[in-house]
Amino acid sequence: MGILKLDNIKMQFGGVVALNNLNIDVEKGKIEALIGPNGAGKTTAFNVITGVYTPTSGDVYYNDKKITGLTPDKITKMGIARTFQNIRLFKNLTVLDNILIANHLHVKSNFLSHTLRMPWSRQEEKNMREKSEMLLDRLGLLSLKNEIASSLPYGEQRKLEIARALATDAKLLLLDEPAAGMNPSETMQLSNFIHDIRDEFQLTIFMIEHHMDLVMEISDKIYVLDFGELIAQGTADEVKNDPRVIEAYLGVEEDA
């Protein structure tokens, strides 16, 4: 069953067509990837899904509901969360505070009740802290809860960013180059981490990634973009042996 569908998406900036009739159908519970050379339109596709851009034409559906044109906060509340290639933590706050901020997405108390420390507001704050600590515990970060985010090793910062996304109660997690800047050991740990959180939190994961070993190892399905157009899709074996994919990545020799 599909959880995310891009239906004939076109994204045009002036005379530049960044996405051209893009059709993607991400299956619920799977790990799927969007790959392609630099400038292929991958991040533009993520920006369309998350409401940063409204497509020139076509529609985006989440759980069969059209989300085209919704603001990013409304899309996040529906269950779609995203991480970025460049880690965007609140670097001067603690690990726990980073998670608490994400939890505020679903807070019902208003500013006045929070300021007056009304009983229901205090209880909601207590519940939110307990939920945040439980999430950190499940992801192996609880012992770091009082550490400043910027002091963490790079791999732990990436895990924290993913944890913050999960704190929004996401069911579809978009990962934008999660292995960027990681060494081989960290990348292997990330691969296991992605599998673990998919299973434990019953997630669907859709990722952009240039690290082909990671993509080929963990992806149930791979989509390949080139100059804004989908040129291939399928399993790792199908995609890596597709002549159009080989040409897009490696080019072809010109005739003498």
Image (tube, rainbow, N blue to C red):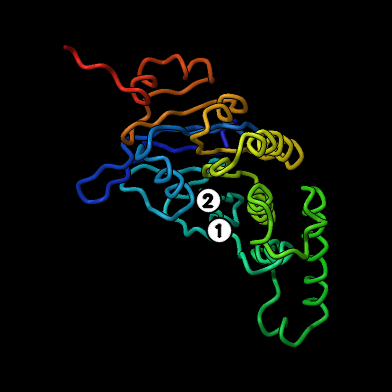
The quadrant of the picture occupied by the C terminus is top left
Answer above or below: position of 121 versus 175: below
Q: Which amino acid does label 1 sit on?
A: Arg
Give x and y (percent) for residue 230.
37, 29
Give the image quarter of residue 219: top right
* Residue drawn where x is 82% and y is 56% of the image: 143
Name the quarter where the N terminus is drawn: top right
Q: Residue at x 57, y 55 (%)?
A: 76
Q: What residue type is labelled 2?
A: Phe
| Mark 2 lies on residue | 84
Q: In which quarter of the image is residue 131?
A: bottom right
Q: Nearer the viewer, residue 206 or 110?
A: 206
Q: Is residue 130 visible in this depiction of the protein?
A: yes
Which residue is outermost to the bottom? 116
Query: Which residue is at a point 37% across and 26% down the rendered structure image?
Result: 249
Please state the horizontal and vertical placement of residue 125, each as a whole percent of the image: 78, 71
Evaluate if marks 2 and 1 touch, with contact meaning CB atoms under 8 Å apart. yes
**Numbered circle sitting on residue 174:** none
Would you place residue 164 above or below residue 3 in this image?
A: below
Instruction: Tell me the element at label 2.
Output: loop
Q: Distance between the residues labelled 2 and 1?
A: 7 Å
Crowd band around label 1 with a 10 angstrom C-alpha radius: few (<14), some (14–19), many (20+): few
Q: Label 1 belongs to which residue?
A: 88
